[in-house]
Amino acid sequence: MRSLSILLLGSLVVSLSACLEPAEGLMTVGSVAPEVRTRYLKDVDGDMSKLTTYRYPDERMYQYSIDQALKLGKPVVVEFATPGHCTVCDKQLQMLKAMIAKYGNDVIFLHMDQYKNPQAFTAFQVKGDPWTFIIDANRVVKFQRAGRMLYNEMDYAISLVLPKAEEAS
């Protein structure tokens, strides 16, 4: 019985960490985000299957290439998630849709799938997913985290890059 428990615990640890790899060389907070050209909706004539392995994609996550988004002077959330091989990524993208509903006009949300935009993973030095980067209007990475985030965690992280009320007036 004890060996079965150890085997089950070991399997759980392996499955929970399967999507993530060590963060050596990862782009860090304070880095300038790379202006990498990625494929987006116009490039694929609206065929979402050429941009994502996500079963329920939201077109709002595929409106811009990363380089285009960074030039718009708005905060950008880049979500690296490949639901085609990562079940946690699916949950992360569902939560990201709720963030789009809340911040859609003030923040640009981008989803990068490893199978469809591998150059983004290379440029951001991401070696696993899900992985979230939040970039301010000046193209500086203000937040990055590996793994799935909770709604309140992401909500707080996004609030860090939004203009303060006194700055907006």
Image (cartoon, helix red, strand yellow):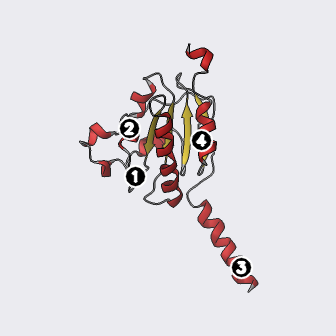
Residue 25, can we see it? no
Residue named by callout 2:
38
Residue named by callout 3:
5
Mark 4 closeness class: few <14, some 14–19, many ≥20 residues within 10 Å: many
Quadrant in the rendering for residue 39: top left
- Disc on the earlier residue, 3 or 2: 3
Residue 48, can we see it? yes
Q: Residue at x 69, y 72 (%)?
A: 9
Q: State the CA–CA distance, disc 4 to disc 1.
A: 25 Å
**For residue 58, side relative to residue 97 (left or right):** left
Residue type marked 1: Tyr
Q: Which residue is drawn at 52% across and 48% down?
A: 95
Describe the element under mark 2 as helix, strand or loop.
loop
Q: State the CA–CA distance, disc 3 to disc 1.
A: 35 Å
Q: Which residue is drawn at 42% across and 33% down?
A: 66
Describe the element under mark 3 as helix, strand or loop.
helix
